[in-house]
Image (cartoon, rainbow, N blue to C red):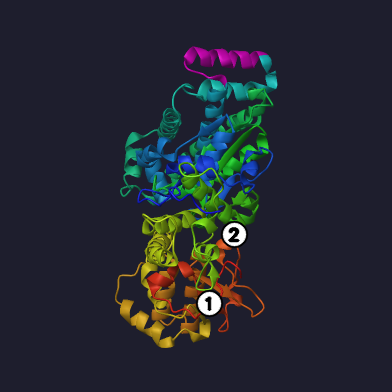
């Protein structure tokens, strides 16, 4: 069908916002169900970590869960008083020096917060008397075997009607008071938390040995009893509670972030094992989860034990096309027509021999945010027109490409702070080349250009750079390291065998080191072509159909 003659794109038009938290109108009307929502809503399903890259739709999924379920408790990291924990004299210092393991306390803290939040919400406790009444009623209903759990609630539930932040501070203060009591001597403790320079090594070890048992709280057994009886406390099989935590990738607390998130994952797993009526649901970026495991890895750690918790967010071509058409409809039908509008009504049939819808998808990393962003830039070029032409799409593509390049650097800067420099290796290349075809003089020129830069050495890119500069690895090994990381972030795809398709990391396709050889075909992602000045041979297929 043709779009209504009265319709023209306006400068203020869009098909939604890149961030789901600002996209209420379009998200509510244009949500595409990929099946992930039902999995999260199922309390008997272990998958509780919505895992994906920036823009994959994690936040949107959690927002739809809040719409679908009546008992969702959203806990914001910034309201958890975690900065307070980091800045306390004792815990802050213990975390920085790392001689006392705080993971047990962090797990207890999360478990305490979640348990109290569910009970507070379920019984609608608003003051001290209501709290007392609830515990009295539970004592009448429960057996003597449940006294441990009820004693904990009575003693350590704080002021149940207060906000989460209050309870976090209360339990943290209690731990610090217990540490002070265990040390006994305020002067020794003060000296210790100020660096302990005047204390002997023997005295420092003694202080640590006194603190660790306190941190490994004696309340763990009692709190575990509460968690195990949570379903019984709720006492209504029809009522399911979902505790949702998003924005864990924000810089809400640097010093202890990884330890706290690791403890949070452990707690979510523990709740799944102990309760079928309470589910902890987290949204995590893939790269952040990798950092959590890397920084908190202890002896015997096995990441595969946690894989059952991960719900990887991914999208197919059909799902992204459905999302785009729903949003186009939402924009156009509200004002101009009652008929269904498809992408064919506003876009040209093809561009450079490729069907236009796939031309657009090829330039995304198969994420809703990319599709929305590209189409919005097309709308900006189409102001005053009822359709979007090839020329408008090409103009929008240049702007979009620069944005995607910047977004990719921002997305991975915590892992690869020098990533922008390394993109020089890809500039002005053919869009496809083998590892062997990457010019040796290009690598040498790159090394000379950046040799005297102050290159940070804690990330894999910079370590490889310095290893090559110091002749610890040869040029081929350096190239393989760079290729691996470019693949990981989605900047390139790889074809390791002639019979294979191009593989992309954002489509959950892994490549082992041994598979990358001189004959491995490298394809630079189309979203970067315009920004990096990539040369493309005519009529070559891209990623959407490979």
Q: Report the residue marked by disc 2.
A: 317
Other residues around mark 1 within 10 Å, as few (<14) / some (14–19) / many (≥20): many
Residue 450 coordinates in the image, percent (x, y): 32, 76
Q: Nearer the viewer, mark 1 or mark 2?
A: 2
Asked whether 538 or 499 is in front, the reply is 538
Instruction: Tell me which secondary structure the magenta stretch mostly adopts.
Output: helix
Residue 104 can be seen, yes or no:
no
Which residue carries the number 1 mark?
Answer: 522
In terms of depth relative to the viewer, which is nearer, 442 or 214?
A: 442
Quadrant where the C terminus is found in the figure: bottom right
Residue 322 is at least partly visible in this image: yes
Image coordinates of residue 185 in percent, x first then y, are 36, 34
Magenta region includes residue 127 = yes
Q: Secondary structure at mark 1?
A: strand
Please tell me which of labels 1 and 2 falls first in the chain. Answer: 2
Q: Examine the rendered structure and indicate whether residue 305 appears above or below residue 146.
A: below
Q: Nearer the viewer, residue 324 or 314?
A: 324
Q: Residue at x 51, y 77 (%)?
A: 480
> Residue reaching furthest front?
5
User: Quick one: SS at disc 2?
Assistant: helix
Label 2 crowding class (10 Å Cα cut-off): few <14, some 14-19, many 20+?
Answer: some
Q: Which residues are magenta?
A: 123-140
Let me know if residue 460 is in the magenta part: no
The residue at 59%/56% (across/down) is 315
Quarter of the rendering containing residue 194: top left
The correct choice, above or below, for 156 with respect to 20 in the image is above
Q: Residue sitting at 59 percent across and 35 percent down?
A: 68
């Amino acid at each position: 069908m043709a779009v209504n003659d009265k319709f023209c794109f306006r400068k203020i038009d869009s098909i939604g916002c890149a961030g789901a938290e600002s996209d209420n109108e379009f998200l509510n009307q244009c949500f595409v169900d990929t099946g992930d929502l039902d999995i999260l809503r199922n309390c008997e399903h272990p998958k509780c970590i919505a895992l994906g890259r920036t823009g994959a739709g994690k936040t949107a999924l959690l927002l739809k869960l809040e719409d679908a379920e009546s008992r969702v408790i959203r806990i914001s990291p910034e309201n958890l008083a975690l900065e307070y924990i980091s800045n306390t004299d004792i815990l802050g210092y213990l975390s920085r020096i790392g001689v006392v393991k705080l993971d047990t306390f962090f797990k207890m803290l999360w478990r305490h917060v979640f348990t109290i939040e569910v009970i507070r919400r379920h019984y609608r406790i608003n003051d001290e008397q209501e709290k007392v009444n609830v515990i009295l009623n539970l004592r009448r209903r429960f057996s003597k075997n449940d006294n441990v759990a009820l004693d904990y609630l009575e003693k350590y539930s704080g002021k149940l009607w207060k906000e989460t932040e209050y309870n976090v501070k209360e339990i943290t203060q209690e731990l610090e008071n217990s540490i002070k009591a265990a040390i006994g001597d305020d002067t020794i403790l003060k000296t210790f938390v100020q660096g302990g320079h005047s204390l002997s090594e023997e005295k420092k070890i003694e202080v640590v040995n006194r603190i660790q048992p306190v941190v490994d709280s004696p309340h763990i057994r009692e709190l575990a009893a509460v968690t195990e009886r949570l379903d019984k406390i709720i006492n209504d099989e029809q009522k399911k509670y979902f505790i949702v935590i998003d924005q864990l990738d924000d810089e809400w607390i640097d010093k202890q972030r990884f330890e706290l998130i690791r403890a949070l994952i452990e707690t979510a797993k523990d709740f799944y094992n102990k309760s079928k009526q309470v589910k902890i649901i987290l949204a995590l970026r893939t790269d952040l989860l990798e950092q959590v495991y890397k920084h908190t890895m202890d002896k015997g750690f096995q990441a595969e034990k946690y894989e059952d918790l991960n719900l990887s967010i991914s999208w197919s071509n059909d799902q992204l096309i459905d999302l785009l058409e729903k949003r186009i409809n939402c924009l156009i039908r509200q004002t101009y027509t009652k008929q269904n509008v498809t992408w064919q009504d506003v876009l040209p049939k093809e561009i450079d021999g490729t069907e236009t819808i796939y031309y657009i998808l090829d330039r995304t990393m198969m994420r809703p945010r990319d599709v929305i962003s590209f189409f919005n830039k097309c709308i900006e070029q189409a102001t005053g027109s009822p359709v979007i032409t090839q020329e408008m799409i090409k103009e929008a593509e240049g702007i979009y490409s620069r944005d995607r390049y910047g977004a990719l650097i921002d997305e991975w800067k915590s892992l690869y702070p020098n990533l922008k420099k390394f993109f020089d290796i890809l500039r002005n290349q053919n869009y496809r080349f083998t590892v062997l075809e990457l010019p040796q003089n290009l690598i040498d020129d790159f090394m000379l250009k950046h040799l005297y830069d102050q290159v940070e050495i804690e990330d894999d890119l910079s370590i490889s750079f310095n290893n090559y500069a110091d002749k610890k690895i040869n040029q081929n090994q350096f190239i393989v390291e760079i290729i691996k990381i470019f693949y990981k972030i989605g900047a390139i795809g790889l074809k390791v065998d002639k019979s294979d398709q191009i593989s992309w990391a954002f489509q959950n396709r892994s490549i082992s080191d041994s598979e990358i050889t001189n004959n491995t075909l490298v394809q630079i992602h189309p979203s970067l072509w315009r920004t990096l000045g990539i040369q493309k041979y005519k009529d070559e297929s891209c990623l959407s159909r490979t």
